Amino acid sequence: MEDDIDFSSIQRDRTELQRLSSDRYWDEFNGDWKSYLQDVFKYDDAPPSVEKPFRIKVKEKEHPFVNWI
């Protein structure tokens, strides 16, 4: 059984993705990644993190070279 692959639609979709991502990043935001990501995720509706009191909080050790420099 031979599947027909539509290479023109693959190229068209790839060009469209390029236009919506990196071209927009450079043209509209001039390489400013922070502004770009704020715009990309402005409609992100992920719920805020909730407190999880059942998790054990581990105190981080101080880095041994913190006072070295």
Image (cartoon, rainbow, N blue to C red):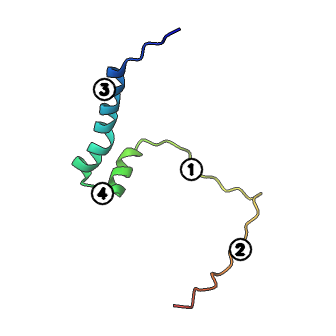
Left or right: residue 10 compared with residue 48: left
User: Which residue extends farthest front?
Assistant: 1
4 and 1 marks in contact (CB < 8 Å): no
Report the residue at 42% width, 46% height from top: 41
Which element is circle 2 on? loop
Which element is circle 4 on? loop
Which x, y percent locates residue 55? 75, 59
- Work out how far the residue at label 3 is from the one at label 4, CA to CA, in angstroms: 27 Å
4 and 2 marks in contact (CB < 8 Å): no
Left or right: residue 54 compared with residue 19: right
Report the residue at 43% width, 13% height from top: 4
**Residue 64, quarter of picture:** bottom right
Of the residues under marks 4 and 1, which one precedes in the sequence? 4
Dot 2, crowdedness within 10 Å: few (<14), some or many (≥20)? few
Of the residues under marks 4 and 2, which one precedes in the sequence? 4
Which x, y percent locates residue 63? 62, 81
Of the residues under marks 3 and 4, which one precedes in the sequence? 3
Of the residues under marks 2 and 1, which one precedes in the sequence? 1
User: Which residue extends farthest bottom?
Assistant: 68
Residue that badge 4 annotates: 32
Residue that badge 1 annotates: 48
User: Which residue extends farthest left?
Assistant: 27
- Work out how far the residue at label 4 is from the one at label 2, CA to CA, in angstroms: 35 Å
Residue that badge 3 annotates: 12
The kind of residue on which mark 1 rests is Pro
The kind of residue on which mark 4 rests is Asp
